[in-house]
Amino acid sequence: MERCRFRIRFQDRVGMARDVAAVVAVHEANIVSLEVRPGEMHLQFDQVPAAVLSGILQQLTKIADVLEVTPVKWLPHELNQQRLRGIFDTVEESILITDKHGVITMCNQKAVEVLGLSYSLVTLPLQEACFPPEIADAIISGQLKQREVLLKTPYGGVRCLVKSNVVFDDHGDPEGSMITFEKMSKVRRLAHFITQPVMVTFDDIVYSSNVMAEAISLAKTVARGNSTVLIRGESGTGKELFARAVHMASPRVDNPYVVVNCAAIPDTLFESELFGYAEGTFTGGLKGGRQGLFEFAHTGTIFLDEIAEIPPHIQAKLLRVLQEGCVRRLGEMLENRVDVRVIAATNRDLHQLIANGSFREDLFYRLNVIPICLPPLRKRREEIPTLTWSFINKFNQRLGKQVTSISDAAMERLQSYDWPGNVRELENAIERAVNLTMGGKLEVSQIMLPETAAGVKDRNHLKKAAAEAEKETLIDALDRGGSIRRAAKLLGVSHTTVINKLRRYGLHKRPEDSDG
């Protein structure tokens, strides 16, 4: 039934509310709400026949000191509720307000969407609004502050991070709770955006060989899909760079990218790390249990580096995840569906591991849907100059150096070495060399590498090698500059620095150095 709402303006005096109420009562209308403030009153009563309404309004205007009676669409408290509702519905988190008995008195649109219920959930107790009984009891008693909870909605289980705070009345007594909750998938995405490392794209991968161009072309093509990728190659060839680039070029780019180093996780923790555990599974485990890395990577990509190191007893469970898209936490019977793209990498011969029984053949075929092989650096030596200059520019910026050239002898040394550590070892060698150089040119003496078949001198003692390289650079600068001051200018260091280094290496000033 429609209700009548009016605003009454008046000269403030004692008894005004009584006089207004008396007029309405005489006409036997039911007053629903009466809000009074100085000089203004808002009146709401149930709908009455038109003749009765006319009589009420006529008598209200005749009350002493009444200035104006006008109809309004909403009362002040209704407008405040609408504003509060608008604020609630713009908040990203789901919100429920309950009384002290756990009965829902208010909710926002997000809560309605997550719980899969309508606004009729208002007046429902928490136990009937998808919350497990033990969680509802913990909220009512004020014992739940924050916990991951499985809410049982009409559309199935939804894992949420639930937070609860007790609401107190004006006397400091508890009168209910404010509950906020968020889907764990959204919490994971937030954690991803906060903690994700710097990502790389295919444009960041430096190469100049045909074989690498073919590998990148294949990776760009498969990035657009969801199939599992297996990247093989020796240590240091850039397998993780490729995995990151595939993720960045995929439709999952805005979702988590999770890196798992299978060789770094102890066997006893492997299952709980990957698949999570339920509350009470372990002594000292987290209250509410813990999600595994597969759940954390939901809707994103998980990179399983050094996949050959995964323990045999975990391989069967991983195979089920790949086949069924489901994970089961330790200590739980319920399986959780996960939408995760898997990229695996290894530097080991998986065929040999299959032959000796340490790697499951069926798991290999499930992983090897799209194989990408990265060749070692010794089989693409034409890329060494390109990579070298890329690293020189990188370390110039990082170390504040100005290396602008490299001697032919230094480049020949780089190209004659076999690089068992591949691109990673080359990067380390260039970083050392840029650190050692005092001028703008990388010399062969600054390229320190282990002994090779090409006869490169063994450089096991880094401090001695660095001192020799610095001494040679000083002598060269003095020969070219003719004086300490000009040598300092050539080297880009101070005059005092050159003098101190001359003393350190026992190099005495010459007669023509009097300008220093």
Image (spheres, rainbow, N blue to C red):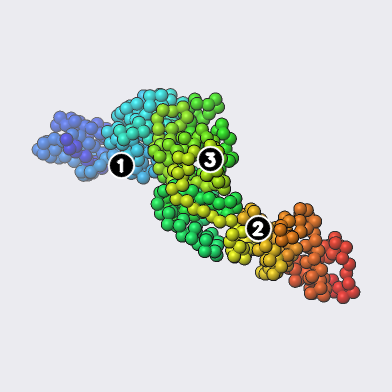
Task: Label 2, secondary structure: give it.
Answer: loop
Amino acid under disc 1:
Gln
Q: Residues within 10 Å of mark 1 (few under 14, many from 20)?
A: few
User: Mark 2 = which residue?
Assistant: 418
In the rendered structure, the answer to whether residue 423 lies left or right of residue 316 reads: right
User: Mark 3 = which residue?
Assistant: 355
**Picture quarter with the N terminus:** top left
Residue 174 at least partly seen: no
Amino acid under disc 2:
Asp
Numbered label attached to residue 380 = none
Pinpoint residue 131: horizontal percent, then vertical percent: 37, 29
| Quarter assignment of residue 463 | bottom right
Q: Residues within 10 Å of mark 2 (few under 14, many from 20)?
A: some
Q: Nearer the viewer, residue 246 or 236?
A: 236
Nearest to N terminus: mark 1 or mark 3: 1
User: Mark 1 = which residue?
Assistant: 82
